[in-house]
Structure formats: C-alpha cells, structure tokens
Image (cartoon, grey):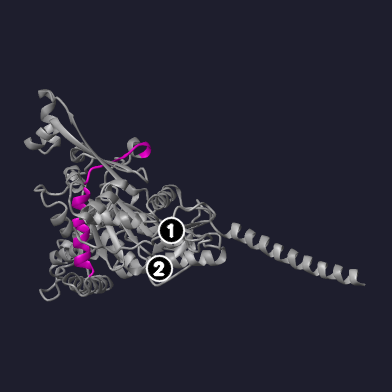
Amino acid sequence: MAGARMNKKLFGIGLIAVCVASFGWVRLLMIFSSYDVRPRLVSIDGLQSFSTYKDHDFEWYQKNCFGAMTEKLSISTLDDYVALWKRSSNPYCRNTYEKFSSIYAVNKVSGQIVVPETFQVKLLKWLGNNEELLKEAKLQFITTVYNQYTHESSIFNPLRSKRPGLTSDEDADSYIEELSSKTEKNCDLCEYKYKTAEDTFGRIESEHSVTAANAFKYDSYHALVMFKTHHPLLFSEEQFVDFMNTAMKWFMKVHTMDKQYRFPHLMWDSLPKASASQVHPHAQISLNSIRYYGLMEHIKQAGMRYGQEHDGQNYFSHLLQVHSALGLTTTLGNASAMAYITPKKDHEIFIVSKTPNTDFFRLLYYTIRAFIDDLHLYAWSLAMFLPELEPWSTPDYDDIPAIVRIITRGPPTSSRSDISGLELFGASNVNIDPFSVIQHIENSVKSRSQPQSEHNLKQQKIQQQIEELQQQLEQQKQADPPCDGESEMCKLNEDAAKENGKEQEVKPPEKAGKEEAVKPPEKSGDAKELVKEVQHVQRR
C-alpha cells in the first residue's frame, strides 16, 4: 500500500513536470514564431523611433558651422562646405558632421575638353551664346554624392542641362488643355461604374474619389484610386486629401480581410510623358505580404543596418537632420520635406512623417502644386511607402516612417526619354541643383497653407466668374440666335464645323430693322481672357 501511494505521488509529480515542460516548449515555440530572434547589438529600450524634431535651423548652422564660407551653398560648393564643417570646433556641429559623413560621401572632380573653332559656334548656341558658359564647358566640375547605406549615387553637372533635345518648343499649356479635352470624351475612368473592374469586396468611394480593381495586376491586391474629375492638373487641396484618404481606406479594407497583406505602396505617374496609361489622374495602390518592393526594401534594410551600427539611432531622423543642417528641408506640422541630395532624377523631394497623416498629404499637395503652378513642370512620378500595417515581430531598426518620393519627368511635349542606361544600370544623372529646388517648396508651403490667403480669395472670385460665364453661354446656346455672318462667334462656329469635316452653310439673316438686328456677344475678348485666367488659377 505504501508503495502504491508512493507511485501515485511520483506519477502526479511527473505529470506536473510534463505539463510545465510542455508549457515551456509551447511558449518557446510561440516566441520563435512570433518574434524576431536575430541577435541585437542594442537593447529594445535603446532603439529610437523616427522624429521630425530639429534642434537648430539652417541659420544656426550657417552661423556656427559654416560662418567662414562666403560662397553661396550649392551642389557645386558642397564639398567646400563639408570640408569646413569637418574642421568646426563647435561640438554640436562636429556631431552633426559625423552623422553626415557616416551616411554620405561627396566627391568633386574636373574634366577638360578642347573645342575646335568648327564646333564652337554650335556649342555656343546650345549654351545660349553665353561666353562664360563656354569657358565653364572647357573646364567642367562634376560633383558626385554617394549614400553609403542605400548605395544611391547622383552625378551633378549643371552644364548637362544645356544638352540639345532637353527642351521643347511646343506650348505645354495648350498641349495639356487639348490632351485633356480630347481624352475626356472616351475616358474609361470617367465612367468607372461601367468601364472599370471592381475588387471582390467592391469599391471604396467618397465625394471626390473612388477605387477600381486593376485589370492587369502586379500583386494579389492591386487597385486604382482616381479622382472623379478628368483634368490631370486641376484638383484642389480638398480633393487631393480626399483622394489620399480613399487610398488609406482601401489599404485598411484589404488588411482587415487578409492580415498577411501589410506592406502598403502607392505609385502615381502624371501624363504620358511619365508613362501614365490614362490621362485621367489616378494612382496605383497595392499591398504585399512579404516585403516592400525592391528599392524601398533596400532602403529599409539600409536603415536597419544604420541602427545596428549606431547604437539604435534612427536612420531617417539623422537623414532629415543632415539635410536640415544644409538648408534643404521645410516642415508642415508633423511632416517634413527634403530636397534629397541623392535624387533619382530632377527636382526630387523626399517627404517623411511618422504616420500618413493630413500634414503628410498636404505637404505632398503643396509640392505638386509648386511643380505645376510655379515651375510649370506638368509630368512627374511619385512613390509612397507607408509603415507596416500590423507588425508581426518585435520593434526593430527596420521600422520606417511614412515616405513619399517625387520627381519631375521633363517637358510633357518632349518625345525624348528622361531615363537612360546610366539611370537604369548605374548612377542618377541630375541636372537640377537641390539647393535651388527647396526654395520653391518653401514658397509653396507658405503661400498655399494659409487659409483664406490672397491667392484663395482670388481663386474663389475667378471660380464665381467662370460659373457666371458658363450660365451665360448655356443661355445663349438655348436661345440659338441666328448669325449675322460677320460676328466672331459665327466665325468660330464655322471654323469648328470645318474642322469636324461637317462644314455647314452659314447664312446671314435677312435684313431687318435696327432694333431686330442680332448683336454679337459683348466683350468676347474679355471672356477668352477670363477662361485663360480661370484655367491658370484652377491649377493652383
């Protein structure tokens, strides 16, 4: 009996031990499946999250770090500024320089050419008959900026912007208006309810925008988000923020249905010059279940490596800080924009925020408006990458902020591609100095972010005038008055009929009394000018 009781006790103890061991193994299995088990060089408590906070502005750096420099800061003088920065005795300046030098390497070289007299006339023509530029052409300076973590490399030589074929003589504004009018007649996206596909869960729709499934997918969940208006450049801040919010709702809808899809992407190309298949403004939105797409995944991994090698410091925070030290940033609320010094192409702006919030969207909108309204650059491409929707691992160095990168693509009327073998397989050839780009973005933010600014009041007034004009034209159309054969309106109608191959005979009315004579529309010239002004203001 005593032995039996002992066996029961041993059995109970053994059962408890087995349960404890099983629980431990199950818990260990859960840890391995749910957490990132890679070795860490710093503790989780030592990791720093992204922040747009800046200790000092550019004026402070200019005074305390670059005070001895007399030349204006530009890509051509960047190497001199960096050398002075390195020698600064100010501890904070030295600390910021170490961050810059750990990320970037700047190299400047020169190259000489001999210009025979038989070629000099043509070269001078390309250079705008500027003798000073001809001297610069004979001894050129090329600056290369290399990112030692992302391995992005950009080559700057301002003279390369003078190469033949980079500009177009065709009027871009007329081209845009004609293209918009021509494509609106048979636009699939304008009739999205009948001429676009839907996702299995339907559409996400709001007042100004709507989604459609992409008929030719590049991921399992791949859709379009589009404006409900057709013109590629005429959209307001309200419409734009609505457009972005619709994209965010689509991301969350997909993620709610399928939790493994958690890496959001948004791509937008404006106009055929930037490879847009439809003139109607729209963006590609997609979610991936494994990782971000190529280049962004590479940048994410670069940020992780930077954190591992710098005691958990945040790569993107330091990236923003060194650009700010060079006067290459502007801020709107919780979002910041950088004139990136390793751009993919001309005018690149790199916008960051901890989350995809309204400030982030507004700053992007003001950047786009600066391109369209201030620089008259109508073709552009952008890519947006957002933080992982629901992390399945513990916090790590690879946590990215909300990021959007946008570049211009050259004149929309030019048939020449802005991408060459150098950009595809080597480094980026950039013709525009980032130090000149940031001023346009700053001005755009200041002028467009103020409610009821002078610009907004003018826009409201012009919009009211165009509505009145449209009502007058509609009333005139309904009245359908006969032509007198010589009025400007009759001549326009006759030209339009000829152009459509349907020339019609326009007969003047029979002679009537002075009171019955048909008068041409008053101030037709003013109406034309008003329409032109409206088209210009609406773009703003």
Residue type at the position of mark 1: Asp
Residue 291 point in image, percent of width and height: 49, 53
Q: In which quarter of the image is the C terminus?
A: bottom left
Residue 519 point in image, percent of width and height: 14, 70
Residue type at the position of mark 2: Asn
Residue 479 point in image, percent of width and height: 25, 73
- Label 1: which residue? 399
Residues 247 and 298: in front is 298
The question of residue 433 being in magenta is answered with yes
Label 2: state its secondary structure.
helix
Q: Which residue is drawn at 52% across and 62% down?
A: 198
Q: In which quarter of the image is the N terminus?
A: bottom right
Query: For the view shown, which residue lies furthest in the left direction?
Result: 131
Which of the two discs, 1 and 2, labels the residue nearer the N terminus? 2
- Label 2: which residue? 245
Q: In this view, does 180 lie to the left or right of 71?
A: right
Q: How crowded is mark 1: few (under 14 residues within 10 Å), some or many (20 or more)?
A: many
Is residue 396 something one can see in this rendering? yes
Image vertical order of residue 448 relative to residue 148, above or below? below
Q: Tell me which segment is drawn in magenta.
A: 424-449
